[in-house]
Image: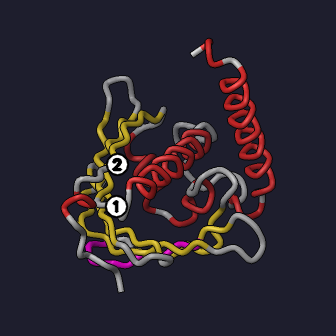
Amino acid sequence: MPRTDATAEQRALVLDIDRVFAAPRELVWRLWKDPEHLVRWHGPAGCALAQCEQDFRPGGKWRRTMTARPGHAHVIFGEFIEIDEPRRLSFTYTNESDGFETIVAMDFLEQPDGTTRMLFRQTPFISREERDGHSRGWNSSFDMLSAYLLMFGIDDWRPKGRPRIDGVAADFAAAEARNAQVIEDNVNEHRHPESR
């Protein structure tokens, strides 16, 4: 059962993300709506959806299982609150591991140049560390969404490529390369503190 008894400090923890996607708003919306698309982009680098179910209507439930390796399962689930196609989407979001419920709200804004600006907000969080972890995860996932959008032409919006669960090794390699670079950057920063 999700926990909704957030403290004032937890309610003050908010994650705001502002992203622009090089695609029309209707296409970006479809990629959130259709599980056949979600399995091709959703989740941070190094993870993939092993399960993706959703009843896309206000009051409908959704459930996803992310996996990073054999035997690993990170289950998230919730309920759709608001669906104003293609302008606004909001839903509850709960990690099965801690049962703490957050609310995600997204506004999709059509831009004059044909791109889509997405304003994303999630709150409250059980801790600052949890919020910061979600920030890294969502931003990585939105990088995947940006890359997936590059596969689409003007008229053909059918799912492209394989679900990421089939090609997750490439994500692992990319994630490992990024982690190695972060470690190297941190080591270099500590060796040469005068460069800060």
Element on which disc 1 rests: loop
One can see residue 55 in this view? no
Picture quadrant of residue 131: bottom left
Residue 18's place in the image compared with 192, above or below, is below
- Comes first in the chain, label 2 or label 1: 2
Q: Amino acid at mark 2?
A: Leu
Residue 136 lies in the magenta stretch: no
- Of residue 125 and residue 111, the one placed in the foreground of this image is 125
**What x and y, as percent, mark residue 7?**
22, 67
According to the image, label 2 marks what residue? 15
Residue in the picture at 63% in, 56% down: 40
Distance between the alpha carbons at the discs numbered 2 and 1: 9 Å
CB-based contact (under 8 Å), mark 2 and mark 1: yes
Nearer mark to the viewer, of 2 and 1: 1
User: What segment is highlighted magenta in the picture?
Assistant: 57-65
Residue 134 is left or right of residue 106, and the answer is: right
- Of residue 3 and residue 174, the one placed in the foreground of this image is 3
Residue in the picture at 59% in, 45% down: 144
Residue in the picture at 56% in, 57% down: 42
According to the image, label 1 marks what residue? 125
Residue in the picture at 50% in, 53% down: 133
Element on which disc 2 rests: strand
One can see residue 58 in this view? yes
The disc at residue 18 is none
Residue 38 is left or right of residue 173, and the answer is: left
Residue 97's place in the image compared with 23, above or below, is below
**What x and y, as percent, mark residue 113?**
37, 23
